[in-house]
Image (tube, rainbow, N blue to C red):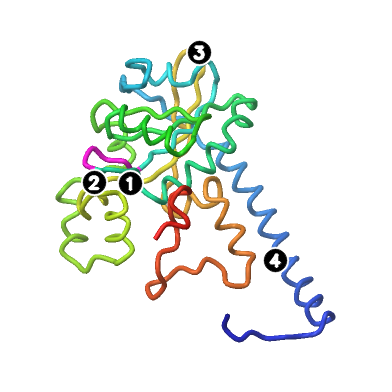
Amino acid sequence: MAEHEVGTQNEWQAARDELLEAEKELTRRGDELAEKRRELPWVPVEKDFRFETTTGTESLVDLFEGRSQMLVYHFMFGPDYEAGCTVCSSIADNLNANALHLNAADVTVLLVSRAPVDRLDASRKRMGWDDLRWASTVGDDFNRELGLLATEEELEPFLEGEIPPTVARMAELSGTDVKAYVTEGPGLSVYALSDGRVYRTYVTTARGLEGPAMGYYGLLDRTPKGRQEGADQPLWLRRHDEYGAT
């Protein structure tokens, strides 16, 4: 471990008290942002999206399963992937652990991807996500409408540049090439069902997923070494049944 400043208990306590004030301010600011999220205008979902599930073809309304709110995680598992994205798998671990509690609060939690439903369900069973359903989108519009599915034209500048090693490694871990891997995008979209009509209420992606769906980062941020990520550090994240493997 790198050398670090060492101090007395009194010095630590003084620094900790100063940090605590900043943490309290961040908490207050987080409460304000949560209220602003709830105040966002609702957007009616006009398209008749369809999804393939293990029980057949379902509409967006069907996926609510009788609840009035729904969190949809757009899981990077494209038609050409052999396995789902490693990072998305870690997010699904967190969602599965919280699904029963969210269900009790009138919220359905769902994974959606473009891969065939039989491949998705096999992965769900392998990972032990017993409290999550995983639906396959019929067509590309559901992800594309939210900017979570890129076109070849949009990807061209990225693919013509130097590919970050982490991206190349993630593509390899998903059993696909870089182009197919980055065609997909992760995201969380939120919906309300009112009087039989579906409304989109919130969407986030990238680092916006850390707070609600990547709890391990919050814990790592409180450890001495932190996240241990960077261009010169090896990728440590794995699917939960792969830790300890060569």
- Considering depth in this image, is 19 or 63 the residue closer to the camera? 63
Q: CA distance from mark 4 to mark 2?
A: 39 Å
Where, by quadrant of the figure, is residue 63 drawn?
top left
- Residue 77 is covered by the magenta coloring: yes
Q: Position of residue 42 (x, y in %)?
A: 47, 30
Q: Quadrant of residue 117?
A: top left
Disc 2 target residue: 150
Secondary structure under the numbered disc 3 in the rendered image = loop
Q: Which residues are magenta?
A: 76-80
The residue under label 1 is 185
Check disc 2 and give the amino acid type. Answer: Ala
Contact, mark 1 vs mark 4 (Cβ under 8 Å) = no
Q: Which residue is mark 3?
A: 195
**Of helix, strand and loop, which one carries label 1?**
loop
Query: Does residue 57 lie above or below 229 as drawn?
Result: above
Give the image location of residue 128, x and y in percent: 49, 35
Whether 151 is among the magenta residues is: no
Of the pair 51 and 148, the residue shown nearer to us: 51
Give the residue number, with chain letter if any, for mark 4: 22
Cβ atoms at labels 2 and 1 below 8 Å apart: yes
Quick one: SS at disc 2? Answer: loop
